[in-house]
Image (cartoon, rainbow, N blue to C red):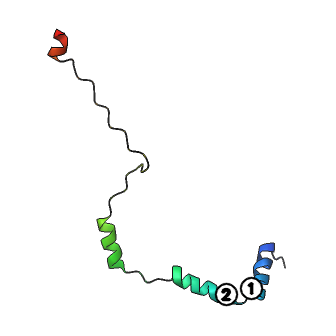
Amino acid sequence: MYESDVTKFIRELLEKNPHLAEEQRKARARWWDKKIDFEQLRRYREVQEPIRGYHYYPLPEPRRPASAPSEESKAA
């Protein structure tokens, strides 16, 4: 049966260091296995500012049509 080099490496690593499996479970519990407070998440989403479409640079101002020359500029 075929076994990839990566699979062999991981299997041998775990055989040489059996404590890694327990450390992996602890790290997962610390970083990922969390209970979610959906009420707190809802309140957080309600107070967030909406994200603009292009975040890193301000959008250009819309161009306004050129207005007709004023009476003062005609007299000059």
Answer with left or right where residue 62 lies relative to residue 2. Answer: left
How crowded pointer 1 is (Cα within 10 Å; few <14, some 14-19, many 20+) is rated as few
User: Circle 2 sits on which residue?
Assistant: 21
Q: Residue furthest right?
A: 1
Q: Are marks 1 and 2 in contact (CB under 8 Å)?
A: yes
Under circle 2, the secondary element is helix
User: Which residue lies at the image location 34% right of the left edge and 58% below the top edge?
Assistant: 50
Return the x and y of residue 36 as percentages of the image width and height.
Answer: 41, 80
Determine whether 39 is above or below 18 in the image.
Answer: above
User: Which residue lies at the image location 32% right of the left edge and 78% below the top edge?
Assistant: 39
Under circle 1, the secondary element is helix
Q: Nearer the viewer, residue 36 or 73?
A: 73
Q: Amino acid at mark 1?
A: Leu
How crowded pointer 2 is (Cα within 10 Å; few <14, some 14-19, many 20+) is rated as few
* Residue 25's disc number: none
Return the x and y of residue 48 as percentages of the image width and height.
Answer: 32, 64
Return the x and y of residue 46 as percentages of the image width and height.
Answer: 29, 67
Q: Nearer the viewer, residue 31 or 39?
A: 31
